[in-house]
Amino acid sequence: MSTYTIYFYLIFISIFTYSCKKQKNEKLVENDKKLNLTKFYSVDTKLDGEDSYQNIGNGYNKMGKFYTQECIENYKVEYPKNTQETVINLMDNLSKEQLTSNLNLKLSSSISTKEVTITPELQYIQEASSSRLSKTMTYYSYTKLGEIRLKENENGLTFKKDILEFFDSNGKIKNHYDFNRLCGDEVALSQIYASKIMITVKIKFKNKFAHSEFDGKIGVVQNAVIADNKFKLNANINKIDNQALQNSILSIHGIQMGGESIQLNKILGLQKSSCTLDQFAECEILLDKINKYISEDYVKEIQNVELSRWIIERVNTVQYENLNLKNLNGSELNFYNNDSSDDKYKLSQLKLQIENLVTKETKNISIAKMLLSNKGIAFDVVDSLNEIIDSAYKNINIYQNFAKECYYNIQKCIEKGILSIEEKYITKYDETVLKQYMGKKIIEINSNSKPNHGQKNRSSINFPVSNFISDGLDFTNIYFKVKNSDNTSLNKHNGTFNLMCDKYSDKINGPTNTNLGTSEFWLSGFAYQYWHDLVFLNKIKNNYIINLEVLLINYKEICLERQSAYIASPEGFSNDFILEIWGDN
């Protein structure tokens, strides 16, 4: 990325940092006086759809991923004096995985699992990622306010007197179980506050011609929408054929973490939030709104030092045993009844294992809730998703209770591991449904269980092929799902059917664009394809997946680009059914 591209935005951030420096320092001192520094609470903010409410100095159970009470004392909270870091970048054609990585503001040690919601991050990743027929440019700005940290006093950190009763005069822990229930096994030492904004300009092409024209004459999106050091249609656009411009749609997608994103949401929610590239004036209006927001509105939003304007990017925790804590006699505290290094290692691995399982269940809840927002999915699939949500919440509760109870008998806990709960208490559920519906439903067609009366093959009416077989579709794969006419799925059904092109749907007067002579045409069998219905997908089963490019080749070679198809030759169906066709990129 060239320097001039980001220079415009760096100026605003620099001005913001300089002009607010004094104001921030004054407010921090003022806030210092108002807060009880021995128990400073972070702002109540939303992150990844969950409540992120952490305490500096509070205990943390790493295995179960939950906070406990404050057990240490003799410290104060230290605040950053001014904005510490700003990073600005422009990135081309980010995939879903890359967008997820750049949005990585998840708290590795601070997940609240009481309520998991569908997150705006998931929606942004779906909308803003590049794909088969789209190119993107993403503006990325990260501003770090700094780290609010626990700073020990001159005499060093100590446990509160009532907590020291868990240790004997030699510093050895007497009751690991009750200690862990109250204090956890780690303590939150610091929180990093930051703000992040990502704005994606996406150009989606209606066909391969428009894509190739843009790719050959422009290249990356930056070359089209950056001019005069800001978002603006570049003169390079004039190089593109007008028909390609008409088939190239520019849209804006964005997400903001930190600050008040109300104004950004208004821009992104405009009724006219996209334009074709030949509509210069309309595209310029969209880009101008984004320019103003990035350079003025967003900067103002994060000028205020109030912590509610920032998000918690990361919480740093550390094991108590690494803090050099001592009892009243000056003896160093020992947090293990068994000093075996092998047992310590096994316990650390068990902690990590349970922590990962809690994270997995939380992720499944979020995905299931997102899928439930799709309309028209089968009733029993809805039931399966709700079952996953219920089971995952129960499993999280069991894992967290295990994390508490493990310290009742650590040796036994290590020996049995998670098998002691997985066999008896953990609810198993089928996760395949979470993957099967990650896409967009294109069309659904009703079919009889057998060929229609008087028909050799046909069991449905015609439906437009262009809905799911077209150069202009922005999918990588096409997949097929079958459900009953009462809207219940047939996931375990082994019935099959074909898709056939309708000979009367297009070009019924025969070929008009062939280089073959008349005799050569008839002898070649080319005519047969025009006057007979042919199968272009054979023996399709439920959950069948095919790459769109492969499907296009079959369709063009066999159907000669007729515009309609129908379901044919169903086998193994006792009742009428509905075919759903989905696209996934």
Image: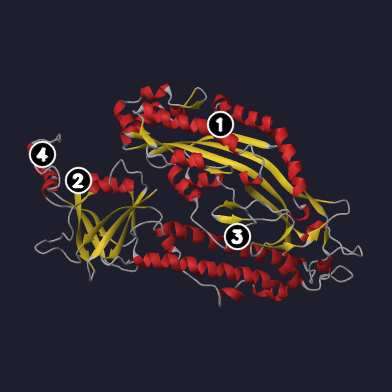
The structure residue drawn at horizontal position 56% and vertical position 34%, both measured from the top left corner, is 89
Query: Against 570, is 32 above or below?
Result: above
In the rendering, at what x and y percent does residue 513 appear?
Answer: 15, 35
Per the image, label 4 sits on a secondary structure element best described as: helix
Location of residue 385 by image quarter:
bottom left
Cα distance in 3D space between marks 3 and 2: 52 Å
Q: Mark 3 — residue?
A: 112
Q: Mark 4 — residue?
A: 520
Image check: 313 left or right of 362?
right
Which disc is residue 296 wearing?
1
Looking at this view, name the residue that lies furthest to the bottom: 424
Tell me which amino acid carries mark 4: Glu
Cα distance in 3D space between marks 4 and 2: 26 Å
Location of residue 303 by image quarter:
top right
Image check: 455 left or right of 556?
left
Of the residues under marks 3 and 2, which one precedes in the sequence?
3
In this orientation, which residue lies closer to the viewer: 76 or 388? 76
In this orientation, which residue lies closer to the viewer: 97 or 555? 97
